[in-house]
Amino acid sequence: MNSPLIFISHKHSDRAIANVVRSFVTERTSSKVKVFQSSESGTQAVTPEIGRTLNDELRRALWECKAVILVYTTPDQDWGYCMWECGVATNPASPDTRIIVLQCSDSVPALFSGQVRVNARDKIAIKQFTTQFLTSPGFLPGVNDPLTGYERNDPQVESASNKLFDDLQAVIPKEPIAEWPTKPFLQLQLLQSVLKQLGDAAPEARTDLARDIVLSHAVVSKSDSKAHALFNMAGLEEGEKLQTLIGLWRERYPKCSDDWVDSLVDQVAKAAQRQLPALRWSAMQALDDGQLHVPVLTLARRLPSISAFQFDVYFCPFNLLDATPVISRMVRRSDMFCKVLEPEGEAKVRILEIIQELSKNGYTRVPFVSPEDQLIYIAHRSMLDQFVASQVSKGNFSNLEKLTLSDLFSEQPKLREMFEKTSAFVGTQATLGEAKLAMNKTPQCYDVFVTDTGKPNEPLLGWITDIIIAETESV
């Protein structure tokens, strides 16, 4: 009689698990049982022949094999080919074949959900499999004798079981598949019979009709706790109407703009007509903490099984500062009011002239930059005014027009340090929110300068003032 054949059905990404199974079979049966493993490139397994048609080779092996060991890991992979292999092996016209599912995660293929499986993560299950495989007569169809000479209570059986379990733990997936929404999530559902009205309506009436349908008939089919909190609810019942949630929000914020409702309804209405919706950044205030969120429709699906459409909506936290790039609001270098300071040039910069320029342009401070456009420091008019006032109080009237930055720093050396350390820097990829954070981390800072990567020794590209941040934040 020819040596019995076991076929290992597996994804090639699970080759390491298949190798463990093959090694167990061949070593414990002293190679009396052959193993077909398509991913094995050495001489330890039967593999498809070079130059042959792969599917024909697989069919031949599946027809001849006594058992198929299906290595099943996670459902995120495409198991179509493995299910095909199991189907070929169990063809009623083929010889009897045993299907053994080696379950390597929490999931199992639906086709074998009712079948006794071997849980690769359970030591007892592995021992039961090992004991039956090595000692039970007829474990493989058509093979009446046990595959080995071991007795059920032989210490070698337990040793083989422990080794197989340990080897599998080293290669099976360590973590289950997990997914969770990172933003408050609400899934809306509309019956296909309701949406059919759109197809019967005149084209010019469809937009308004679609909005009416969404507001009147959309219900919540799925949601998470974060979405519940947005509407200050402990939970949402399946089938809760969207209109009810909108009503709760309007009761709480009767004077606030409800543009977000229009935005959400328009997105769903367009998607229901298989159009690409346009996103308007219209934010809603949450009922629990007042934080702003923008509804964004990310996915629409049609479910023929329940004759309905579903729409996945995420409420993205919205902060205008975080949503605004610095490059879109900064005063560009070409438009900046600043002074180029040559080396040793402070003795040439007259303070009264700087004050007059600041007054003329309505500014309160002026940056001084090097000829290479690197920031040297930023001078504040209030400090310049105080220095001039101190000279007047000393009766130094005749020399006021001659006062320079050199005079200022000679008399008040710590002022230079203050001018140098009251600015912050960000790169061109930063947002106004990051600029505000950098400003807040710097004592007495009212200015953030934009350079290529945010380093102070790089040429200035732009200037963000506290006024720019305040104006954006108040919108």
Image (spheres, rainbow, N blue to C red):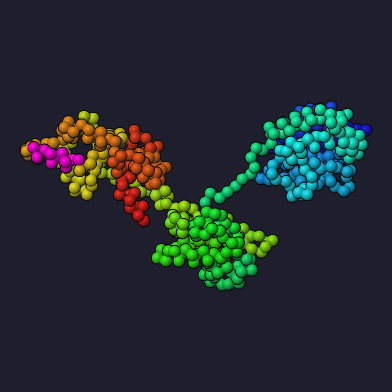
> Relative to the observer, which residue lies in front, 3 or 199?
3
> Relative to the observer, which residue lies in front, 237 or 460?
237
Q: Position of residue 110 (x, y in %)?
A: 74, 50
Residue 378 visible in the shown view = yes
Instruction: Name the residue rendered at 36%, 56% in the picture.
Output: 475
Q: Position of residue 96 (x, y in %)?
A: 88, 43
Q: Decide: is 82 above or below 225.
A: above
Instruction: Name the residue rendered at 78%, 49% in the picture.
Output: 114
In which quadrant of the rendered image does the N terminus lie? top right
Magenta residues (range): 383-394
Q: Is residue 393 magenta?
A: yes
99 to the left or right of 452 = right
Q: Decide: is 309 above or below 73.
A: below
Quarter of the figure with residue 162: top right
9 to the left or right of 173 = right
18 to the left or right of 217 = right
Instruction: Name the residue rendered at 19%, 48% in the picture.
Output: 360
Q: How many marks?
A: 0
Q: Position of residue 367 (x, y in %)?
A: 26, 40
> Relative to the observer, which residue lies in front, 227 or 283?
227
Magenta residues: mostly which secondary structure?
helix
Residue 406 visible in the shown view = no
> Relative to the observer, which residue lies in front, 466 or 206?
466
Instruction: Name the residue rendered at 36%, 52% in the picture.
Output: 473
